[in-house]
Image (cartoon, coloured by chain):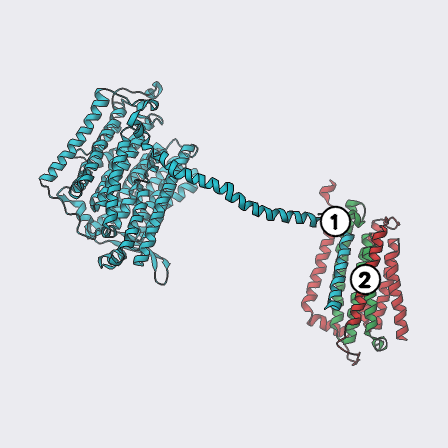
Chain colours: A green, B cyan, C red
Amino acid sequence: METILKEIGVETYLYLSALLFSIGVFGILLRRNAIIMFMSIEIMLNAVNLMLVAFSTFHQDASGQVFVFFSMAVAAAEVAVGLAILVSIFRNHGSIDIDNLKNLKG
Amino acid sequence: METGLVLLLLLAPFVGFLTNIFLGKQLGKNASGYLGTLAVIVSFIVTTMFFLQVSETKQPITVHLFDWIALDQFSVNFDILLDQLSLLWLMFVTGIGSLIHIYSISYMHDDENMHKFFGYLNLFIFFMITLVVGSNLLIMFIGWEGVGLCSYLLIGFWYKNQEYNDAAKKAFIMNRIGDLGFLVGIFIIGYVFNSLDFMTIKQAVIAGEASANLALLGVATLCLFIGAAGKSAQIPLYTWLPDAMAGPTPVSALIHAATMVTAGIFMITRLNFLFDLTPTVQDIIAVVGAVTSLVAASIGLVQNDIKKVLAYSTVSQLGLMFLALGLGAYEIAVFHVITHAFFKACLFLGSGSVIHALHGEQDMRRMGGLKGVMKITFFTFLIATLAISGIPPFAGFFSKDEILMVAFHENKALWVIAAIASIMTAFYMFRLLYLTFFKEFRGTEEQKHHLHESPALITFPLIVLGILSAVGGALSLPGNSWLNHYLQPIFAHKAHAEHHLDTTAYMLMGIAVVGALIGIGMAFSKYIKKGEVPVEDAQITGFAKTLYNKYYVDETYMAVIVKPIYALAKFSRDYIETGLSNVVFGFGNVTEELSMQGKKLQNGNIGFYLFAFVFGLCSVVFYLFFLR
Amino acid sequence: MAEILFYILASITLGTAFLTILSRNPIHSAIYLVICFFSIAGHYLLLNAQFLAIVHIIVYSGAIMILMLFTIMLMNLNKEDESHKSVASKIAATIAFCLVGIVLLAGLLKTKPVVESYFHSGEDFQSIKVLGQVLLNEYMVPFEFASVLLLVAMIGAVLISKKDKQKEA
């Protein structure tokens, strides 16, 4: 497997992760269900992780993978807190449709 | 040893102040009063020790407490200077202060804020001591401002009465005008001598270093005199003193008769070597003093409030002192300060005793006949009145006579003015005495029923001050003056040549006594023989009305100074400030309008925010990769 | 061989990602996302990052997605009850999607790599041993911060989802 980058080049991974990131953005904009939006965020995070790993292999440097570990830790924390917030919003509003959450209106 | 004693002298009243202010309520009235009194008595005892020491050795004591301001070329140390002059002043400040504290224990006993009263009195004594013992002008200025503050606090002590508050403010603001003069004077002196220390300045003057800057020094001494005029109630800044009678009577006795108002005289005496260099300013001082003396005395002729009469009398006597200062007879001015402190404190305390007996009545038209009931008060009051009128052998005779004598030798016109003022003094003081103590009682039946002699705590200070008023003249007998010898080291020049007891002197004495007797006689014929009582306010007519309304000076000040300032302020508020605030509000309104528009972007729709976010991201990436 | 594997995995990744955001039922979304994550783990394996692949499966597929599924069930969201968005916003979302995709792709196309071509030195840089050394030497402080972050997140999550007793009373 160590020769994968020789065969397809690092650019392909870049295009893949760019597309994956765009899909995440699409999901965020398209959907109103907060949980799906969370999933979209996870997709975007994974797109970036994928790119980091690809470059880590490309440059033969372990730092890229260490960054991915940190990014995972942050993602886990984010999901835990985010879901807790969603649960309490659901408890108070009865739904997690973001169109109902307009308390920030100026 | 000396440092410790000086600190005790200085800080005992301050500790009394702190204790009374912070713990007074818990201590209770008696404890608070006795504590405050004790603090001052401690200072008095220490002062006496120093006084005896310095009288013996004739060496001033200087105590260095700490370095205060240390600059490259200029430094001010916090030094204490105990020389003949400051100790003399301290003697009667703490001495009379102690007596008045004792008096206040009884006088203020029914006041709910008695602890505050004693706290302020202690603070006053502290600042007064600071003023007197400071070895340079800056320390004196601290005390100067401090006594002004205490004066303000004590005039407005009964703060629930708006008139009293106004009187307090008036005193404070008038003093502020004077203080500005004092401050400017200090600056100029600091500039000329590069030092504020009295001793250093004196050495410099003796060495003749000042002769190059005489014009500047003239301005300085004039400014200092303005400061003194503010504090010591001279024309044109005297109007606060009669109003200051709003304070409790012990305050009037201590601050507005015996001690604080003499601070101006103290300052000029302290800097006598500077004033000697500027004869023009001395002339101004003499004229102002003489005119003040006459004007105040004439107003005092028709006043009906017992304390107002005494207040104008104080202004008048202070005028005489300034006359003496202006003529260069500093030691005579000091002598009159001391005798005046004795008899005026006695008079004020006596009037306080009367007011106390009448439950707050101050109008002489509602008094009378108190001679029989209040024997001690009457007797001491009589002695003090004789003293102020200049009847030998009481204290006032000697001091006043010396002033008149100096005036006669220097300038006949001033002598005439001062002599007329003296005759007026005799008249209105005896008018006061007759109206208050003679004939029958004119108050209400109920007051008559409650008439009583005051308790021992009140009469004791009266007796002591009465005795001092009687024998105080011994300090400086003509021809053989202890005071002149004692004060000799203070003055740069040879003390005012003692007048020999020649024919002129005896003649002048005779004229003064006869003048006083004429004044007394006029009062006697008007108020005892004819039994007249001053008419009610509305019926006063003619020149008497002008006098009764104090020459309309307050009204003139109102029209000439206060009203234009009000008008200016109103103009500033209505036009300048409105214009400015329109500009400022304009900015505010524009910002608000813009933000009202910008607010619409914040519609609370998360989807919209995300669109904006993504769009922004795209723009940034686009810019970075394609436009740069 | 690897190339074919890569394209299969890539198409699974992109396809399930699309399905995740497009399916009406949140449960289905979650399941597609799990598949998507597995395929990404496959990419990691292709890049010879075995440890990372395992950690990825444990954290994402194991922990995060289970958490999401629980939440979905807790809220009883398995019905397709999401109201429809307006057509305009759908179009806007699509346009934004295209825009982001084009801009990113174009941007990446324009970049010039620092290392011109891939060169495999055979040096060991991604075994667990090396990763652990790098993590605990070079990145010691961020590592500790990450642990603090997780602790705080845990406490925060517990506090937020705790029922407010005063409110209920």
**Left or right: where B285 falls relative to C101:** left
In front of the other: C121 or B524: B524
Residue sitting nearer the eye, B610 or B159: B610
Residue B616: numbered disc: none
Where, by quadrant of the figure, is residue B383 drawn? top left
In the figure, C17 relative to B297: above or below?
below
B31 vs B355: above or below: below
Residue B555 shows up from this direction: yes
Front residue (pair B612, C63) = B612
Label 1 belongs to which residue? B604
Count all numbered tags in the image, as a single digit.
Answer: 2
Quadrant housing residue B386: top left
Query: Seen from this angle, which residue lies furthest left?
Result: B503
Residue type at numbered disc 1: Gly
Estimate the x, y position of residue A57 in percent, counting from the top left: 79, 74
Q: Position of residue C154 (x, y in %)?
A: 73, 56
Position of residue B571 relative to residue B451, above or below, is: below
Q: Residue at x 14, y 41 (%)?
A: B478
Q: Where residue B356 sits: x, y (%)?
A: 33, 28
Which residue is labeled 2 in the image?
Answer: C99
Q: CB of mark 1 within 8 Å of CB of mark 2? A: no
Subunit ID for the residue under disc 2: C
Instruction: State the SS at label 2.
Output: helix
